[in-house]
Image (cartoon, rainbow, N blue to C red):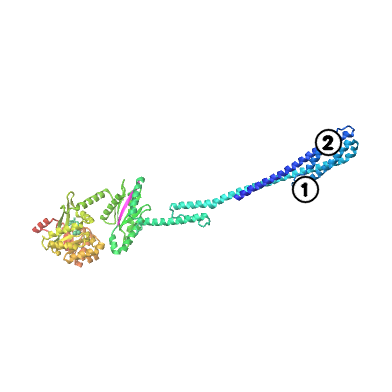
Amino acid sequence: MLLLSVLLVASGLRVGGQVQAANEGIDQLTHLLRRQDREDRAQRRLRLALGDATRVAEQGKPVADRRWAELAAELRAFAVLSASSNGGDAAALSPELHEALAQTRAAALGFVPTARDLIEVARRDPTAIKAEMPGFLGALKRLEAERTEAREALGRAIEEAVDANIAFSRRNTVRLLAGALAAVAVLFAMAVWLRLRVLKPIVAIASRLRDFDDERPDAAGVPGLERADELGDLARGLSEYREAVEARRAAQRRVDFLAHHDALTGLPNRLLFENRLAHELARSRRTGDQVAVFAIDMDGFKGINDRFGHAGGDEALRRAAALLADCIRADDLVARIGGDEFAVIQVAPSQPAAAEALLSRLSRATAKTADEEVAIRMSVGVAISGPDQDGDELYNSADMALYRAKGDGRNTARFFDTGLQEEIRLKRRLARDLEDAIEAGGLYVVYQPIATAGAMRVVGHEALLRWRHPELGEIAPAQFIPIAESTGQIGRIGLWMADQAIAAAATWDPSVALSLNLSPIQFREPDLGGALLSLAERHGVAADRLEFEVTESATLLGHHRDAVLATLRRLQAAGARIAMDDFGTGHSSLSNLKDFGFDKLKVDRSFVAAMLTHQPSASIVKATIGLGRSLGVRIVAEGVETERQLERLREWGCDQVQGYLIGRPATRDEVDRRASVGVP
Ligand code: C2E
Ligand code: CA
Ligand code: CA
């Protein structure tokens, strides 16, 4: 471009120079023409003056000497003028013109002597003028002819030069114009090139970098990597930088993911759940939506773990996670809180409708697994956000509802309500008050007789725990025992209770047995058997007077199973008997019966209560009695309240009976009084 401009300027200058040179040539020609004009005028004046003087002289009139002298002087001046007419710069003139000018000068110089001669003759002898005149006129005519020719040649030359100059100027103007146009075109082309090759790629690179900044994982690569120029270098440098940053980000994302997700199921973990819950609660305050939190617990997970090992347990957890993830909508969140606990956050404009819909999807999904080897069953507690509730509170409410759902029989769902909150508050209070109930004298033991079905002879007493709360009055064991179990207080209370009961039994007829209920939780105590036996020994009660009642849940106690078995074996080895309590309500597997070597089965009172009106219950009672027969195990029917029930049980061959018909649970003093008067 620079070169082009230089060329353009140079050519402009050159054209200017040429035009000027041409103009100078024209000036020179004009000058020559003017000079010819001057010489011509001088020549004409000379001719006229000479003609006048010679005519006067020929007429014989006197001509003053002075006049002749003036003529001579004028002729001399003409001679000088003509001699100095050298034709200018010969190189600038055409040969023809040069020749014409030279001829004119020659004619002028030829004319001067003839004129001088004429003057001399006319001065001296006017009569000789006539003779002299033809020579003079010849020279003059030749001079005039030459001069005319020279002037015409000069005129032509000037005309040609002017024409040539005009043509030249026009040509060069067109050329300059074309040059300028070319320059503009080149400029434009360069602008376009600059835009396509440099600006556009830079804009493209910048826009990719913006994508990259927005952390768009699908962003295309940096364009222009293949270019060999500086832009290519730039693109490659940025691309490398970008890859490095991308790798770091990927690693960071992985770390973030691991920090917020559960490795087994891939679900969000508790941390992410808590963050999201806080976020959704804050947002719902603006939008007016309601947040539902679902606390979910797998039912029977321990049993699955026991039966199928850890791998089977993990598989069940993964299936439960997938099932939950299938039931929720894209906006909801399902998290694994730990163990077999899950939680869901559901935000919806109208609750509990959305929560109920989710629960029914969940219950359909779990029902579908019923026929599989490991059925997925879940208990669910739901809480719906109220104003200004924080995440912890809401989750705790859902957890309370879950607790209730579990208590209500598994594979169900419960919504949290204020009644439940009241119940939970009471449970917390009872748990607290139970701490010092023994010391405060609130706990005491009652004894319910167990008699033979035939002769109705009392063969034993079952010890049952009672709690008289200082403010709330009598609290049912069905209410406080689960609390004592959940807080672990049952261990201490159970031993205190055994101590009381064995002490009482020590005062009874040695043929009367004592039945003690053992909570599954008590088996966590490693030397439960030893502790119980040493109590019996301390109170002087023979171990074979003791019966221990355990529910089937104790026998299913997962990894404690061996410990439970060992404890029961130890007690049996010492002579004690083991009874399976509440038979028929649990899983009641025959293999359990066999493995644990039960000495007794206690038919649950719910079957006894229903057996006269409800055929299936009657069948269960009958079948259980038959089973006892064939296994050589004693059968005790609980909750016998009527003579008709007793009669029917006798018919079916039941060994022993227990219930209000035989005797209500009574205090130790009451039992002693009854024994002394011979009533059961
Ligand atoms: P369980 O072991 O099945 O005890 C029998 C329950 O049936 C007792 O209720 C008793 O009062 C009740 N009962 C007895 N005869 C009849 C009857 O004819 N009709 C009706 N409707 N009920 C009758 P209680 O004392 O309320 O005990 C409830 C449960 O609490 C017990 O069921 C037992 O599982 C648990 N429990 C009670 N005392 C203890 C204890 O010292 N240790 C442990 N671990 N659990 C205990
Ligand atoms: Ca019992
Ligand atoms: Ca029972």
Nearest to the observer: residue 321 or residue 587: 321
Amino acid type of the residue that numbered disc 2 sits on in the rendered structure: Leu
Q: Main secondary structure of the magenta part?
A: strand
Horizontal side of 211 relative to 396 (left or right) equals right
Tell me if residue 641 can be seen.
no
Q: Measure how far apart labels 2 and 1 are at the Cα level.
A: 35 Å
- Quarter-of-image position of residue 378: bottom left
Cβ–Cβ under 8 Å for marks 2 and 1 = no
Q: Quadrant of residue 71?
A: top right
Query: Residue 320 versus residue 22: which sits nearer the camera?
Result: 22
Query: Within 10 Å of the Cα at label 1, are there few (<14), some (14-19), or many (20+) other Cα atoms?
Result: few
x and y, in percent, of residue 401 in the image: 28, 52
Closer to us: 643 or 73: 73
Farthest residue, direction right: 127
Which residue is depicted at the point 23% across and 66% down?
595
Residue 291 falls inside the magenta stretch: yes
Nearer to us: label 2 or label 1: 2
Helix or strand or loop: what does disc 2 sit on? helix
Looking at the rendered structure, the secondary structure element under dot 1 is helix
Label annotation for residue 95: 1
Residue 494 within the magenta-colored segment of the rendering? no
Image quadrant where residue 377 sits: bottom left
Q: Mark 2 points at which residue?
A: 71
In the rendering, at what x and y percent does residue 680 appear? 12, 59
Specify few, some or many for label 2: CA neighbours under 10 Å numbering under 14, 14-19, or 20 or more. Answer: many
Q: Range of the magenta residues?
A: 288-297
- Label 2 lies in ligand 1 vicinity (Cβ under 8 Å): no
First in sequence: mark 2 vs mark 1: 2
* Number of residue marks: 2
